[in-house]
Amino acid sequence: MKRKLLGVLVLSVLSGLPTYAKPPLKAKPAAKTAVVVSPRQKIFDIVWRTVRDSHYDPKLNGVNWIAVRAKYLPQAEKAKDQGTFYVVLNAMLGELKQSHIGVIPPETLQVTENVGTIPAVVGAVGETGITAQWIENLPVVVRVAGNSAAAEAGVKSGDVIVSVNGKLLAPVLEKILAAKPDRNPGEKLVTVWATLDGLLAGAVGTPYTLTLKDTTDGEKTVTVTPRKPAAKMETFGALPPLAAGMETRTLAGGVGYVRFSIFLLTLSDPVKDAIHGFAEQNAPGLIIDLRGNRGGVGVMASGIGGTLSEEKINFGTMRTRSFPQKFVSFPQEPVYKGKVVVLTDEGSISTSEIMAAGLQEAKRAKVIGRQTAGMVLPSQVVVLPDGGRLQFVFADFRTPKGVFLEGRGVTPDIPVTLTRASLAASPTGDPILDAAVDYLNTKETVTK
């Protein structure tokens, strides 16, 4: 559980995953000088200089980067330990108020005291089938996977999670939401969602207790025993291993359903093959579920998009200091020609937002669900001299209509407001999926 918790917290600290993949690099050392500097100052200088030289905006969003250095260098030099030093570095990078920028300390898989106050279980990361989000100012179960450990334990959509192993959950999440009031609200919800994801993962075969409240506020305590995850762990640049999972099935009425957890190249062909399969079956509708998809390789959005249209689709433009690069899809037979829905929520980050916005602006799909995170900046991860990681932004991204998604996100065509009552009342336990099926069952002219 500790490994999973820090993994998701690391991603939330770094504001999601890179939207454009580059191979991991060793950070360039500071220029040789006669002045002797401490190892910490060397790392500080590398972080500060990398951002200064690589950010897509030479003016760094109007932030006085020299003044920022003067403010944080003394704090970095006085830091009592490595953890505090990295907190200072993240505070410095936070001055830019953007996603996809931050540092991870070398011991990335150790939870420090200031990260989690909820007891974690040591062991292989497990899977319970619970998805929980911040609903009506409470941590609420929004989905329970069928035949999962949570389903067998009696966890239901709409349940409020009161405590994990006896530790109250709401105060921890309220603290996260109260921090950094000037940051993107979507980014805070991502951090809450990622924290919940980590806390509920558990260790394979090690039971833990959940205290829950149903919609009548009746309290119950259940024991959940996490299972071995179905998703494979894959590497992505210099980040820790990431779970790459995919689900495909046929819903009532023949509607196709494809869900995948991350945009990694190992999933590219399987996702496209699934869509091709629904094209060959003439499925009356197709749902692409990007809820909880943390992004990844940016160009995969256009790559998958090629299975959905007989014409090219422009997904937007990435701009560095030096050049622009368009993300354009090219038709890949057999193309799926029916109605398409993309499902989103605050866990739809980065490349997920690029794909949802591109299909929406091209009028090739309806976006249904909740507002996305608004964390859409191409970035790269480099290795620091002490083994830590620096993620830094090197480009911006705009949709074909010029919309800057960072800090804004994708607004669904059909927004679905989740409440405890609506979750409990849904026949599937998933009101967003219900709304998608309802839309696909309506008569409407298909635009390609």
Image (cartoon, helix red, strand yellow):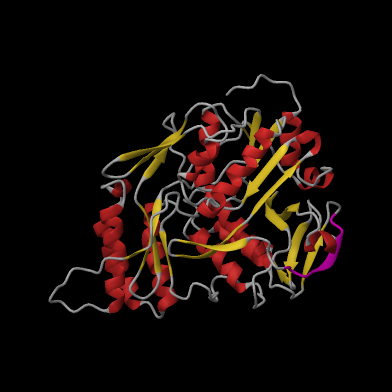
Where is residue 8? Give x, y as percent.
56, 62
Furthest residue in direction left, as rendered = 34
Point out the image quarter for the N terminus: bottom right
State the image quarter where residue 194 is shown: bottom right
State the image quarter where residue 193 is shown: bottom right
Residue 219 lies in the magenta-colored region: yes
Residue 58 lies in the magenta-colored region: no
State the image quarter where residue 284 is shown: top right
- In the image, 61: left or right of 114? left
Q: Which residue is located at x 58 percent, y 50 percent?
A: 293
Point out the image quarter for the C terminus: top right
Where is residue 413? Give x, y as percent.
62, 31
Where is residue 253? Give x, y as percent.
80, 33
In this rendering, is residue 207 above or below 277? below
Q: What stretch is highlighted in magenta?
A: 217-227
Does the rendering let one see residue 346? no
Say which of 190 and 340 sits in front: 340
Say which of 322 and 246 sits in front: 246
Where is residue 317? Give x, y as percent.
39, 37
- In the image, 218: left or right of 34? right
- In the image, 225: left or right of 266? right
- In the image, 365: left or right of 237? right
Does the rendering let one see residue 287? yes
Say which of 190 and 74 sits in front: 190
Q: Which residue is located at x 68 percent, y 37 percent?
A: 278
